Image (spheres, helix red, strand yellow):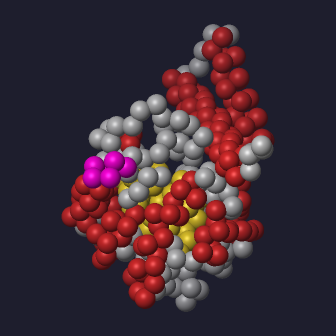
């Protein structure tokens, strides 16, 4: 289980103090400070100016922090964003290897100049920081929201080792590929299945929820978000994006195995172990199927344990923050 647990990605405009305060206490695994679509051109300078002071406030509430940069204003956005506590950068609208490599190069230069390293998993302590080590490199999350970006997804992912996660941009894809009369994009199920396959083949995390045509996607209700998260998890996604705080608990719940699922997985492992202990013989294909089921069960149990550890890490960080805020006795 080398992947970090990032079930909920809450996107918040970086200049909106009220939204940021609400987001800080939403319990999201990742908070994405937006410098792109949700920030009007007249507010860009305000949003950039607030990133540095906002990052530690969000980290103090047990969240990882990403910044969503504008691909057309990349230098300005990254220059304002690479500070201690940042975990990575989300790149929407990416269509070329050159764009990904430019972002990776800028991140590397700013990390070296400012001594910034990616924080360890929430609740854990790293004994030593190495700015050039792969574990300390700031990440890139690529959002494929154009036909070209989806077509060249593998090359874009492999353009740099900084790419650790990917997602689809449903709204922009609808505009790029044209929607059906129902308002949905008939290619979306294919694109979602394809991105899960590509992510697994290239070793990155697929982020997304299986939204229904009638839902409002990143601003959907709690119930619609929960259904989309559960279905997305079953399809192979590891977390989902959202823009409203009420969606965060739905995503965290939907991407966390239930007690019943854990019990079923444990029974599968127990049955496999019993069969091996008893020396049960079976055809080759039966052995392969049993091994596959055991591996799936083991992965689910490991994911459940990692989710629990992530929640405990957040709780510990929040408790430490609250304790530090208490006035000291005389």
Q: Nearer the viewer, residue 112 or 299?
A: 112
Look at the image and tell me in which quarter the C terminus lies.
Answer: top right
Q: Eyeballing the image, is 200 above or below 2? A: below
Outermost residue, left direction?
98
At 49% from the left and 84% from the top, the residue drawn is 179
Outermost residue, front direction?
330
Q: How many numbered discs sit on the rendered protein?
A: 0
* Residue 253 appears in view: yes
Left or right: residue 206 compared with residue 93: right
- Confirm whether the magenta stretch covers residue 113: yes
- Confirm whether the magenta stretch covers residue 69: no
* Residue 239 appears in view: no
Left or right: residue 104 compared with residue 256: left
Residue 121, position as x, y percentages in the image = 53, 42
The quarter of the picture where residue 226 lies is bottom right
Q: Eyeballing the image, is 217 above or below 164? A: below
Q: Eyeballing the image, is 318 above or below 284? A: below
At 46% from the left and 63% from the top, the residue drawn is 52
Residue 152, position as x, y percentages in the image = 29, 63
At 49% from the left and 41% from the top, the residue drawn is 120
Residue 249, position as x, y percentages in the image = 71, 59
Residue 151, position as x, y percentages in the image = 32, 66
The majority secondary structure of the magenta stretch comes to: helix
Q: Nearer the viewer, residue 143 or 69?
A: 69
Q: Eyeballing the image, is 120 above or below 238? A: above
Q: Which portion, as a residue range, is magenta?
A: 111-116
């Amino acid at each position: 289980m080398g992947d970090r647990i990032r079930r909920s990605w809450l996107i918040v405009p970086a200049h909106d103090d009220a939204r940021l305060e609400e987001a800080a206490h939403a319990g999201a695994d990742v908070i994405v400070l937006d410098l792109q679509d949700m920030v009007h051109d007249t507010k860009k300078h305000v949003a950039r100016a607030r990133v540095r002071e906002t990052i530690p406030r969000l980290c103090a509430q047990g969240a990882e922090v990403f910044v969503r940069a504008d691909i057309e204003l990349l230098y300005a956005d990254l220059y304002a964003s690479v500070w201690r506590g940042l975990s990575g950068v989300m790149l929407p609208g990416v269509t070329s290897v050159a764009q990904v490599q430019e972002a990776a190069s800028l991140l590397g230069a700013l990390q070296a100049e400012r001594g910034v390293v990616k924080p360890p998993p929430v609740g854990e302590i790293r004994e030593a920081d190495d700015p050039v080590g792969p574990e300390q490199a700031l990440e890139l999350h690529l959002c494929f929201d154009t036909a070209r970006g989806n077509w060249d997804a593998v090359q874009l992912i492999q353009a740099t080792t900084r790419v650790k996660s990917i997602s689809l941009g449903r709204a922009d894809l609808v505009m790029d590929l044209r929607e059906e009369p129902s308002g949905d994009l008939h290619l979306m199920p294919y694109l979602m299945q394809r991105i899960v396959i590509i992510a697994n083949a290239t070793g990155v995390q697929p982020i997304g929820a299986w939204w229904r045509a009638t839902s409002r996607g990143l601003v959907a209700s709690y119930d619609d978000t929960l259904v989309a998260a559960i279905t997305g998890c079953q399809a192979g996604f590891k977390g989902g994006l959202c823009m409203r705080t009420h969606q965060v608990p739905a995503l965290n719940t939907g991407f966390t195995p239930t007690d019943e699922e854990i019990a079923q997985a444990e029974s599968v492992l127990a049955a496999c172990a019993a069969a091996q202990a008893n020396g049960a013989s079976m055809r080759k294909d039966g052995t392969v199927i049993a091994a596959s089921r055991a591996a799936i069960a083991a992965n689910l149990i490991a994911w459940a344990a990692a989710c629990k550890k992530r929640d405990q890490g957040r709780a510990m960080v929040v408790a430490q923050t609250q304790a530090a805020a208490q006035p000291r006795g005389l």
